Image: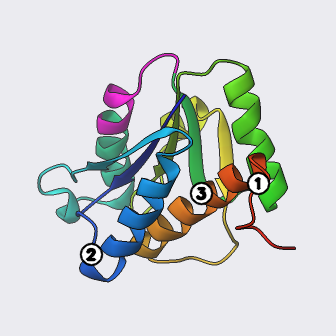
Amino acid sequence: MKIQFWSLGKNHEAYVKEGIAMFTQRLNHYFTTDWKIIPQPKNVATLPAEEQKNKEAASILALLKKDDYLVLLDERGKMLNNESLAQLIQARANESVKTIVFLIGGAFGVNDAVLQRANFTWSLSPLVFPHQLIRLMLAEQIYRSCTILKNEKYHHI
């Protein structure tokens, strides 16, 4: 199974780049893992929020494959503890899912078409964080889940 992290916007900022690279490298011991930074459509910042979400959705939906399992990160999604997240990943592996895509939407979230396409909507927290920090937190949490699945020492309760 492959794990892909997708995020709209700019490349990783220097202050998170090292941590993202470290956790991505660690994750590659469990699953092939990579990042796709989806560039913002041209002149999107001048558009109303709903139109921005529509343009971003077109880019996202064009990249998704039919059999990709899409996990959308959204503050209104379901919150999971570490063990439940690990179980979600294991269940997808057991189902022979080829690729899990973890999507961090744009600044205004995603439109209904992406929300409906999502197989699971996950909230890291009811708080709102900068996208750059979410990237780092996401990579670390998925790594933590993999260590839980392998009964390794990284996760302590």
- Relative to residue 36, is residue 124 drawn left or right? right
Q: Quadrant of the N terminus?
A: top right
Q: Does label 3 or label 1 sit earlier along the sequence? A: 3
Disc 3 packing (10 Å; few <14; some 14–19; many ≥20): many
Do residues under tags 3 and 1 come within 8 Å of each other at their CB atoms?
no
Q: Is residue 109 magenta?
A: no
Residue 67: where, in percent of width, then height? 52, 17
Q: What type is the residue that disc 2 sits on?
A: Glu
Callout in the foreground (1, 2): 1
Q: Does label 1 or label 2 sit earlier along the sequence? A: 2
Q: Does label 2 or label 3 sit earlier along the sequence? A: 2
Which residue is at 61% across, 54% downward? 142
Q: Magenta part of the protein: which range?
A: 59-67
Q: In the rendered image, which residue does mark 1 sit on?
A: 148
Separation of disc 3 and disc 1 at Cα?
9 Å
Residue 48: where, in percent of width, then height? 30, 60
Residue 27: where, in percent of width, then height? 51, 51
Secondary structure of the residue carrying numbered label 3: helix
The disc placed on residue 26 is none
Callout in the foreground (2, 3): 3
Q: Is residue 61 magenta?
A: yes
The disc placed on residue 143 is 3
Q: What type is the residue that disc 1 sits on?
A: Ile
98 over 150 or under it: above or below: above
Q: In the rendered image, which residue does mark 2 sit on?
A: 13
Q: Quadrant of the C terminus?
A: bottom right
Which residue is at 28% across, 67% downward? 12
156 over 81 or under it: above or below: below
Which residue is at 83% across, 50% downward? 84
